[in-house]
Structure formats: C-alpha cells, structure tokens
Amino acid sequence: MWRGPRPATLDRMSDTPVKQQSTAAFYGQAVASFALAMIATAVGIFRLDANAWVRGFLAIAVLYLVTSAFTLAKVIRDRQEAGQIVSRVDQARLEKLLAEHDPFEKL
C-alpha cells in the first residue's frame, strides 16, 4: 500500500540536543587552576616541618586523591552519556513507530 510523504510534525531530528563543548578560555582556566593547586600542594608538602616519611605519605595521598577524582568524574560522565544515548534511541524508535502507523489500515 502506498503511503504519502510523512507529515513534517513527525520529523524531529532537529530537536536532538547538541553536545556542548567548553570554550578555550574555560579549558585554559581549568588547566591553570589544576596546575597551580598541584604546585602549591607540592611546595607545601616539601616545606613542611616533618620527616621524609610524613612528607612522602602526604605526597602519595595527594596523588591518590587526584587520580580517584579523575576516575570518579569519568565514571559519572560515562553514566550520564549512556543515559542520554538510551533515551535518544528510545525516542527514535517511538518516532519511527508513530511515523509508520496507519490508523486506517485494517488489522
């Protein structure tokens, strides 16, 4: 059975969210802030009036904290992106079903 062109109301491809990207200034500020914080912490640990074992422990603890923070941020981002992809796939399936549905077709 021939079906005419789809109504324009069902074509919603332009409604999909566009992935936001950070500006170069924001990226530069984030990198500079991270570098400044790491340098300040390293200088503070180095100049601390304690023996080498204590300073070494604090340095390793700071590095472990930083790697854990990066890992946590990545996991949270990946979960959020996976949720958006599943939502978009479900929306596309629903739009396809609605576009192909003919209410006047005999069952």
Image: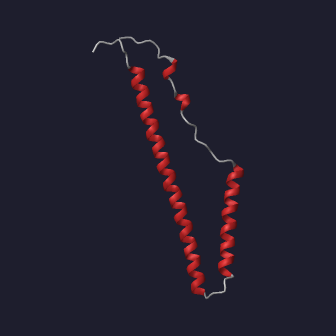
Relative placement, left or right, of 102 versus 61 is: left
Q: Residue furthest bottom?
A: 51
Give the total number of marks visible in the rendering.
0
Residue drawn where x is 70% and y is 56% of the image = 29
Location of residue 32 (image quadrant)? bottom right
Look at the image and tell me in which quarter the N terminus lies. top left
Relative placement, left or right, of 105 versus 98 is: left
Residue drawn where x is 72% and y is 51% of the image = 25
Residue drawn where x is 65% and y is 69% of the image = 38
Look at the image and tell me in which quarter the C terminus lies. top left
Residue 98: x and y in percent read 41, 23
Residue 4: x and y in percent read 44, 12
Location of residue 69 (image quadrant)? bottom right
Location of residue 48 (image quadrant)? bottom right
Residue 7: x and y in percent read 49, 16
- Does residue 102 sit above or below 17 in this rendering? above
| Scheme of image coloration | secondary structure
Residue drawn where x is 51% and y is 61% of the image = 71
Residue 28: x and y in percent read 70, 55
- Does residue 103 sit above or below 27 in this rendering? above
Q: Residue furthest left?
A: 107
Q: Residue furthest right?
A: 25
